[in-house]
């Protein structure tokens, strides 16, 4: 791949004592956010890019850890010297959102009021709550306004929300493979995933930590279902087709088709490290996301509050958040006379395309970022 | 005659556009015309383009480019959002000719359309010689041409009449980009029209 990796990186932790009042009515009295930074903040503090993560992402966006060279960031292919998020020019910040399970305060963290894990008591967090928490991290880092806030999928929704909530603090928003709100079908998939977790006997109403167990079966199913929606039919066909692990049918319910093997592997891997409560929270944040709700569903009125320039990108094979959903955002921006570029990228990897390395896709992001004046 | 952009129709179009106007360029390519208009006239510009390489080039040029297919309409644009909607040398590549003209005048106050004139005498001579024309303004072989509609100034004006479109202004250029004032359907290689409609 062109450009270089940012190399060895270190996790950082910020503690916030000021209570955070959440959209759900809940309050987090204090919280931690783990984050990483790549590149150098310039003297004017004008070159910072915030990368927001999607459902299962985290702060480790790029590079690797010195003691774990194999642990490479989830969007490493786009960050580094000579890459679109060029760390010779930009100061890139990644963090783990509230409710996460990678070090920031979440359901598996200790609730100071009880001395036990938050579990089911962890309040529901919304995308806008994350944005407020991220703004406090920006304050702490001395960043008044981001050169860009960007992300794919749920990460793109955070970039969109930033531009509405803090219009003076976002100069550019890069919204990739996102939607202005979920469709009924999107919510339906999320609910099946949640039901898989909620009905797992090991869930214990969300307080499974106290039982020294985890709802692994439910989380595994949730991930298998989610994973199908991230891929395209064509891609699955090319990758697996109807290939069998053994040459003949076994006429049983064990793994037979390669696609089954793949999905079970993905489910097992994910269920091995991810927290089920976090999965529930992230899917609810997705379901509730709808900035236009503040304007009776009129997204154009909502986007009138934004001042940023936008790059919107979608993928032709993404059936989870189709190009048409991105174009809803484009239309609302155009109606307000905002600066917006929109690329509909022909990549075969479905919703997951946003994580892939592709010369045209990365070229678009690179070209857009190169024109940003610091 | 030299032209800053190598595109004589661009200069004509630029001359028709007032500073600060809102301009939509359909089939904007790498955004050269919009960039020219932004720098020269301070317009607010948006382009629509289907081709990946052109979209990338337009983004490099800092243009508000929307990737899309004109054949599917201009749904992302609201009514009368623009002062001018430009379709430069693209109408002959569009199947839904009436549809795109209607869409142009839905989203814009004025449509600016340029297209190669099939009845240009060199084109006619070429056909009489038994060959499909290849010229400055029809620069393709029959087998690799993006053009799907072949028409003349007279044909276009008939369509405008049928659709109730008003021709506000017309400029006709020869192959060198020089203005043609007589026998335009015979001597003109490229035509540029300003259209409006009564509301």
Image (cartoon, grey):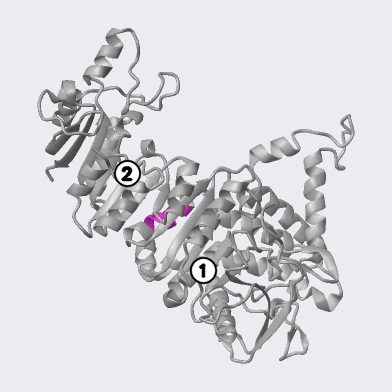
Residue B100, image quadrant:
top left
Q: x, y percentage for residue A336?
A: 33, 62
- Tell me, for residue A2, which label it has, or none: none
- State how far apart marks 2 and 1 are (Cα): 33 Å
Q: Residue at x 71, y 70 (%)?
A: A277
User: What residue sits right under mark 2 in the picture?
Assistant: B5
Q: x, y percentage for residue A326?
A: 47, 53
Q: Residue at x 19, y 48 (%)?
A: B15
Majority SS type along the magenta span: helix
Is A167 positioned to the left or the right of B168 in the image? right
Q: Residue at x 51, y 81 (%)?
A: A44
User: What residue sits right under mark 1 in the picture?
Assistant: A148
User: Over which residues does the magenta segment extend?
Assistant: A326-332
Few, some or many residues within 10 Å of mark 2 (<14, 14–19, 20+): few
Residue A97, image quadrant:
bottom right
**Residue B15 seen anywhere in this rendered image of the structure:** yes
Q: Chain of mark 1?
A: A
Q: Chain of mark 2?
A: B
């Amino acid at each position: 791949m062109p450009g270089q990796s940012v190399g060895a990186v270190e996790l950082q932790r910020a503690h916030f004592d000021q209570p955070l009042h959440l959209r759900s009515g809940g309050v987090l009295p204090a919280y931690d956010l783990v984050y990483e930074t790549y590149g150098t903040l310039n003297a004017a503090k004008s070159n910072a890019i915030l990368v927001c993560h999607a459902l299962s992402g985290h702060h480790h966006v790029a590079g690797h850890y010195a003691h774990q060279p194999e642990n490479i960031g989830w969007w490493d292919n786009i960050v580094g010297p000579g890459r679109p998020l060029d760390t010779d020019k930009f100061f890139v910040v990644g963090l783990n959102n509230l409710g996460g399970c990678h070090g920031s305060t979440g359901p598996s963290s200790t609730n100071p009021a009880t001395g036990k894990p938050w579990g089911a008591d962890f309040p529901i967090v919304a995308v806008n709550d994350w944005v407020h928490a991220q703004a406090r991290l920006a304050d702490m880092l001395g960043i008044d306004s981001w050169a860009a806030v960007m992300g794919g999928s749920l990460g793109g929704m955070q970039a969109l929300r930033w531009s509405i909530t803090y219009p003076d603090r976002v100069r550019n928003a890069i919204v990739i493979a996102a939607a202005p709100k979920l469709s009924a079908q999107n919510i339906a998939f999320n609910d099946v995933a949640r039901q898989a977790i909620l009905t797992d006997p090991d869930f214990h109403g969300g307080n499974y930590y106290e039982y020294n167990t985890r709802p692994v079966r439910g989380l595994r199913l949730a991930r298998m279902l989610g994973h199908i929606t991230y891929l395209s039919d064509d891609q699955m066909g090319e990758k697996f087709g109807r290939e069998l692990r053994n040459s003949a049918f076994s006429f049983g319910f064990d793994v037979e088709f390669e696609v089954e093997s793949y999905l079970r592997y993905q489910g097992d891997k994910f269920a091995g490290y991810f927290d089920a409560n976090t999965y529930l929270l992230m899917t609810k944040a997705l379901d509730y996301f709808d900035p236009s709700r503040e304007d009776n569903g009129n997204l154009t009125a909502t986007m009138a509050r934004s001042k940023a320039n936008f790059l919107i990108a979608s993928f032709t094979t993404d059936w989870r958040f189709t190009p048409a959903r991105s174009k809803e955002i484009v239309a609302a921006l155009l109606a307000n006379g905002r600066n917006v570029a929109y690329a509909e990228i022909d990549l075969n990897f479905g919703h997951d395309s946003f994580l892939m390395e592709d010369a045209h896709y990365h070229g678009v992001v690179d070209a857009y970022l190169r024109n940003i004046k610091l | 005659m030299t032209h800053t952009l190598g595109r004589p129709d661009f200069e004509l179009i630029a001359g028709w556009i007032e500073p600060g106007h809102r301009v939509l360029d359909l089939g904007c390519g790498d955004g050269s015309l919009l960039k020219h208009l932004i720098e020269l006239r301070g317009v607010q510009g948006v382009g629509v383009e289907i081709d990946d390489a052109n979209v990338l080039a337009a983004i490099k040029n800092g243009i508000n480019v929307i990737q899309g297919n004109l054949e599917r309409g201009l749904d992302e644009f609201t009514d009368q959002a623009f002062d001018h909607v430009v379709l430069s040398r693209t109408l002959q590549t569009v199947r839904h000719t009436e549809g795109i003209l209607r869409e142009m005048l839905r989203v814009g106050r004025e449509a600016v359309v340029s297209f190669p004139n099939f009845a240009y005498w060199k084109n006619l001579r070429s056909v009489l010689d038994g060959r499909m024309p290849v010229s400055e303004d029809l620069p393709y072989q029959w087998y690799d041409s993006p053009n799907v509609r072949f028409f003349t100034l007279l044909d276009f004006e008939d369509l405008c009449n049928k659709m109730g479109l008003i021709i506000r202004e017309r400029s006709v250029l020869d192959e060198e980009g020089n203005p043609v004032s007589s026998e335009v359907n015979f001597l003109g290689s490229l035509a540029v029209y300003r259209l409006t409609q009564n509301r």
